Image: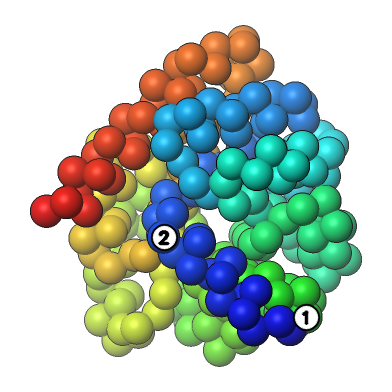
Amino acid sequence: MNPKLFESRKQRLRDATVIAIFRTRAAEHAIESAAAAVRGGFEALEVTMNTPRASDAIAEIAIRGEAIVGAGTILAPEQVKEAYDAGAEFIVTPVVVPEVVEACHDLSVPVCMGASTPTEIFTARQAGADWVKVFPGESLGGPDYIADVLGPLDGTPILVTGGLTPENYLGYLHAGAELVGFAGSVFDADVAAEGDYEELERRALEVTRRLDVYTAQ
């Protein structure tokens, strides 16, 4: 691990606070959706590896250099190397896969490991996850669930995804989450397929403008 590079990537992700997540029907849709998110103020972007030609999309987005780019839906260490070679600078898993942590840290890449229950959240953190991705946030109970979990597990760095919208996401930050991710509720694959990237930019702006007001308080 290169500690300086690793900490730099962690800080960039932490500073971004909001992550745009793209699970689209084509790599081109992810690339253009990412551009719309950046125009809307997002500084962290995630392409899921079950997007067709996900590595190509990550590579193109990374070359543009407009935001920190990560890969999601990582289920095995081999996928970490594939995503890293494409340009990913952070990794997100949907479940607890301890082997992924070593693969990420060897490459100086932070990892957000998916979990739902308090036991899974604790296990993910013990395995070395830099953030624990609590998913699906809304279905689990919303901000109250995060606040309840952080009672006994205070100090756990949390990323929340799953059902977050411009209207509800600030509640998660208030409850103690450090990062929040927006997938289909904001970056809708159907809207991308229709080519309406102005709509995706509008939705992105709605998220980031609310964040600006929240952080200014």
Q: Is residue 176 left or right of residue 61?
A: left
Location of residue 114 with respect to 57 vertically, above or below: below
Q: Nearer the viewer, residue 41 or 124?
A: 41
* Residue 98 seen by the camera: no
Expressed as whole percent of the image width and height from the top left, the position of residue 10 reads 54, 70
The amino acid type, in three-letter code, at marker 1 is: Asp
Neighbour tally class for label 2: few under 14, some 14-19, many 20 plus, Cα within 10 Å: few
Mark with earlier residue (1, 2): 2
Q: Would you say the residues marked 1 and 2 are in contact, meaning their CB atoms lie under 8 Å apart?
A: no
Helix, strand or loop at disc 1?
helix
Location of residue 57 with respect to 94 vertically, above or below: above
Helix, strand or loop at disc 2?
helix
**Quadrant of residue 204 in the image?**
top left
Colouring mode (rainbow / by chain / secondary structure / one colour) = rainbow
Q: Residue at label 1?
A: 106
The amino acid type, in three-letter code, at marker 2 is: Asp
Q: Nearer the viewer, mark 1 or mark 2?
A: 2
Q: CA distance from mark 1 to mark 2?
A: 23 Å
Q: Residue at x 81, y 34 (%)?
A: 52
Expressed as whole percent of the image width and height from the top left, the position of residue 148 reads 26, 73
Q: Residue at x 42, y 74 (%)?
A: 157
* Residue 126 seen by the camera: yes
> Residue 15, labelled with which disc?
2
Farthest residue to the left: give it. 217
Q: Is residue 24 left or right of residue 103?
A: left
Expressed as whole percent of the image width and height from the top left, the position of residue 180 reads 41, 53
Q: How many marks?
A: 2
Q: Residue at x 73, y 84 (%)?
A: 1
Q: Nearer the viewer, residue 68 or 137?
A: 68
Location of residue 98 with respect to 186 vertically, above or below: below
